[in-house]
Image: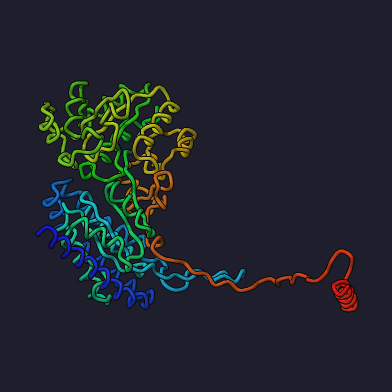
Amino acid sequence: MALDYDLSSIQEARDLARKAKEAQRILEGYDQEQIDRIVAAMSEAAVANAEWLARMAVDETKFGIFQDKVKKNLFAAKNVYEFIKDMKTVGILYEDTRNKVIEAAYPMGVVMGIIPSTNPTSTVIYKSLISIKSANGIVFAPHPNASRCINAAAQVMHEAAVKAGAPEGIIGCVTKVTMAATDALMKHDDISVILATGGPGLVKAAYSVGKPAYGVGAGNAPAFIERSAHIKKAVSDIMTGKTFDNGVICASENSVLIDAPIKDKVVAEFEAQGAYFLSKEEVEKVSRVVMTPKGGMNSSCVGKEPKVIAEKAGISIPEGTRILIAPLEGYGPGFPLSYEKLTTVLACYTVKDWEEGCLLAIELLNLMGAGHTFSIHSQDDAIIREFIRKPVSRILVNTPASLGGIGYTTKLAPSLTLGCGTIAGSSTSDNVTPMHLINIKRMAYGVSEAVASERGNCSSGTVSTEDIAAIVKKVLAELKG
């Protein structure tokens, strides 16, 4: 039976890819006005359905917070839409009349969208919008633990697109979720590009199939509170970033680095805002519950409130605790909580100055999260600018990392796929937008004359036909002799 189901799922994936390609061939003939009308309708539908999709996501995955999932759905439906709605993505994009170069867009084809369980419905909304905006089709491969809500979101987006004039089948989603189906979809000839959001193994697989792919790496973002920071706001930002949807956004803070001269004030402020500092014994208990022996995240603790984690670890925490903070003396295999934690647990270190903070942040990023995100809280612009050298793609200043990274509280491109650059083996360091899903062709007119090369000349002058005849006669006479 398992084999039959796998074969059936593979066939479904192939059918979806084929239908999406047929639909995309039609869509690529639409003009910008037609595309924009469809995208606007999809945005409206996503806004109208944001709440029940969020409820479905929480009920199915048991991750995160309903209200925050609503906000993420609305972020994808509104913020992403507002950012992309006026983008020119069809036909001529730019014309340089002086240098006589014309740039024109043409779509990549069909996108494969790999969707995680942590941000399922919002990622479907976001990827649907940017794919259709760039005149591509898209087929989703859901995480098995979120397949129902992912399919529901895909259906909402597809119905809205078709009602507004898009061809049937332009957005598809696998319902029979198996690794065999995901693999078949990745390798299908009708899939042109892979937009991968998920675990490191799946993202690596996406890059290995030989197609263009945009993938994201692990987060594990450090947050440094430098001595000139506005302490109350810095702590508030970090608490907001880490508690938003219970920490499941990959850009969320995973460790806090405190400048030694302000340590006592920072600790007091964290406690005042609902943080609980774990004792050394409690750190060990929480480590065993939250992390696996190999340094991975225990899925039963992903996106959970501190109360749930404390109960699993067998420790007592104050009522109303918003976050658990684990003071650590090192990082790496002996310190499990120094790795990425998509939940309400934050590692904590004390550093003597910004230079030590900089070095420790780099070590933490190299351990896990290189290329992704780092945040700093400081009022000293000279020190802030020193951190531009960090091995990350997003350096966020005085803002919650999770929300700043996706472009909610910053002017970065609103996105739920955050590239990590070649630092982490990713093909882009950008927040992915529709412009990453189009090819750009260029028409270039000649603007200068080519200089013809002179042939047959030598340093001693031109060789005449009489000279050539004399040489030939001489050679023939020698051969006869």
Q: Is residue 198 visible?
A: yes
* Residue shown at 27% from the left, 62% from the top: 185
Q: Is residue 173 left or right of residue 229?
A: left
Where is residue 416 drawn, in percent x and y? 31, 53
* Residue shown at 44% from the left, 74% from the top: 91
Q: Quadrant of the C terminus?
A: bottom right
Relative to the observer, which residue lies in front, 171 or 274?
A: 171
Relative to the observer, which residue lies in front, 401 or 329?
A: 329
Q: Is residue 473 above or below residue 348?
A: below
Question: Which residue reaches farthest front?
Answer: 481
Q: Is residue 461 above or below residue 69?
A: below
Where is residue 145 drawn, in percent x and y? 16, 51
Rendered image coloring scheme:
rainbow
Where is residue 63 drawn, in percent x and y? 16, 46
Q: Is residue 132 visible?
A: no
Q: Is residue 385 left or right of residue 133?
A: right
Q: Is residue 343 above or below residue 125?
A: above
Figure quadrant of residue 189:
bottom left
Figure quadrant of residue 155:
bottom left
Q: Quadrant of the N terminus?
A: bottom left
Relative to the observer, which residue lies in front, 198 or 188?
A: 188
* Residue shown at 19% from the left, 38% from the top: 298
Figure quadrant of residue 168:
bottom left
Q: Is residue 368 left or right of residue 163?
A: right
Q: Is residue 421 left or right of residue 445?
A: left
Where is residue 336 drawn, in percent x and y? 26, 30
